[in-house]
Amino acid sequence: MENIKIYPDKKTHKHTTTYKLREDLIGLSKDFDEASYLEIGIAAGFTIMSLIGHYKTLHGCDTNKGLVDQVREQTNDVSVCHGDIFAMDKGKYDVVFIDGRHDYDSILSDTLGVLQMNTASSYKIVYHDYGLVAHPSRNMEFGVKRFCTNFYQEIEFLGEPKDWNPAAKDPATDWEAACVSITSINKETLLEKMKNESR
């Protein structure tokens, strides 16, 4: 677990995760043989780089080319690409961490991409910033919680339970992340339901 504290956490840097959530992501790797990890929205790369040595392969994407280049300059242990989930190659990803845009439609698009691109028969999707509520001065919605409760009946919560976002002005009133299990049984049903909603 030594890597998780090399990089800043959510208490001091608003575009990353807490140390507790990083520990939970490492814990998820133990559910799979030679686990593969995919992160959508790598930002400065603090979360994905803290997982080096805990996953067999680490992959990430971000729509900000400067951030992608920054991660490439820091490590060769992470495969990153510029673009969204649809810029990624199809592949087997045991744990998928979604931390891109947090509006409902973007989460829907990212999840549809994961369901279509991931060839694993069963895997976990972790949605970051589940408990964020937009500050009243901002004209926006954090749609993670609404999305998760709309599509999933069973949700496991990860990271910190509340007050984990002091570096930003948006309050955190609920869990940091939500984790769901995708299986060959529920994947097609979810895919159909999400495609219908995205039309």
Image (cartoon, helix red, strand yellow):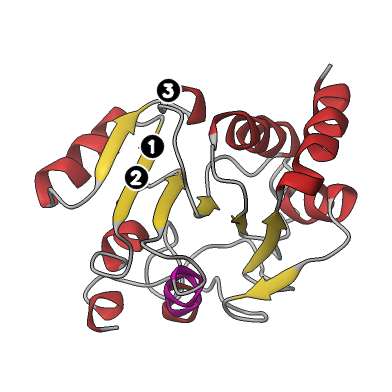
For residue 61, which numbered disc appears in the image? 1
Residue at point 25%, 64% (across, down): 52
Q: Nearer the viewer, residue 159 or 93?
A: 93
Q: Tell me the amino acid under the disc marked 1.
A: Cys
**What distance separates the C-alpha of mark 1 from that of mark 2?**
7 Å
**What distance separates the C-alpha of mark 2 from that of mark 3?**
12 Å
For label 1, the SS is: strand
Magenta stretch, main secondary structure, is: helix
Residue at point 13%, 51% (across, down): 75
Magenta-tinted stretch: 23-29
Q: Tell me the amino acid under the disc marked 3.
A: Ala
Q: Where is 168 relative to 142, above or below?
A: below
The residue positioned farthest toward the top in the image shown:
199
Residue at point 39%, 35% (across, down): 62
For residue 167, which numbered disc appears in the image? none
Residue hosting label 2: 59
Task: Indicate the position of residue 33 as horizontal and vertical percent values.
Answer: 42, 65
Q: Which of the two discs, 1 and 3, labels the residue nearer the N terminus?
A: 1
**What distance separates the C-alpha of mark 1 from that of mark 3?**
8 Å
- Magenta segment includes 59: no
Task: Indicate the position of residue 148 as horizontal and vertical percent values.
Answer: 79, 53
Q: Quadrant of residue 88?
A: top left
Which dot, 1 or 2, sits closer to the camera? 2
Position of residue 142 in the picture relative to residue 16 (left or right): right
Labels 1 & 3 near each other (Cβ < 8 A): yes
Residue at point 64%, 44% (across, down): 102
Number of disc labels: 3
Task: Indicate the position of residue 138 as horizontal and vertical percent values.
Answer: 69, 46
Labels 1 & 2 near each other (Cβ < 8 A): yes
Residue hosting label 3: 87
Position of residue 88 in the picture relative to residue 153 (left or right): left
